[in-house]
Amino acid sequence: MFLDGGFCSLAEMYGYRDPIHKISVGYRLLERCWGQGIASEALGMMIDYLYGETDIEIITASTMIENQASARVLTKNGFPLVAHAVGEDWGYGQPTIADKWIR
Ligand SMILES: CC(C)(COP(=O)(O)OP(=O)(O)OC[C@H]1O[C@@H](n2cnc3c(N)ncnc32)[C@H](O)[C@@H]1OP(=O)(O)O)[C@@H](O)C(=O)NCCC(=O)NCCS
């Protein structure tokens, strides 16, 4: 995504599981772009696309437990917290302790 003509952020959909129609979503912004509602809007657009135009039935997300801004983005978009402080493999060698959300 771009803001004022410059790169600002990315939003991702990953980990598609065909048999259960599940996918995970994420987002990451440059600091100059924080606090302007961009992640919330991007997540809303991903939800609309996935539930409106694909066969996805389950959307999941994971956040670092200290990242309250990211948690807020998810709760604002209707994701309940389903697991707190569980191990998540983000490919860093060691599991990251994360919260899990499902919508
Ligand atoms: C977390 C992140 C994605 C949020 O993006 P953003 O565009 O700033 O988020 P939004 O502006 O859409 O919404 C943020 C919400 O969190 C709230 N918030 C911000 N800091 C907060 C904090 N420390 N505690 C609680 N809520 C907080 C904001 O007030 C806002 O809620 P509101 O609309 O009810 O006021 C962004 O800061 C980021 O990319 N950070 C670095 C990378 C990262 O953490 N990625 C997510 C990995 S799980």
Image (tube, grey):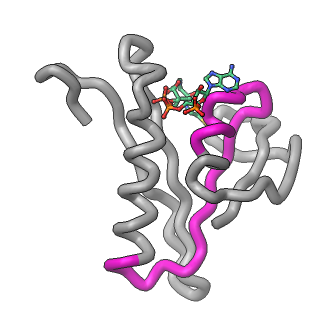
Q: Position of residue 91 (x, y in %)?
A: 62, 40
The residue sitting at 32% across, 78% down in the picture is 53
* Magenta span includes 71: yes
Tell me if residue 65 is in the magenta stretch.
yes
Chain part drawn in magenta: 52-73
Above or below 35: residue 27: below
Q: Is residue 15 left or right of residue 4?
A: right
Q: Position of residue 5 (x, y in %)?
A: 12, 22
Tell me the quadrant of the picture where the C terminus can be found: bottom right
Residue depicted at x 40% and y 58%: 46
Q: Quadrant of residue 20?
A: bottom right
Question: Ligand 1, what quadrant?
Answer: top right
- Residue furthest to the left in view is 5
Quadrant of the frame with the N terminus:
top left
Q: Image quadrant of residue 96?
A: top right
Q: Residue furthest top?
A: 32
Q: Give the percent coordinates (x, y) of residue 30.
A: 39, 19
User: Would you place residue 13 above or below residue 76 in this image?
Assistant: below
Please state the horizontal and vertical placement of residue 92, each as a whole percent of the image.
65, 33
Which residue shows up at 58% across the image and 41% down it? 73
> Is 12 situated left or right of 84 in this image?
left
Q: Residue at x 21, y 30 (%)?
A: 2
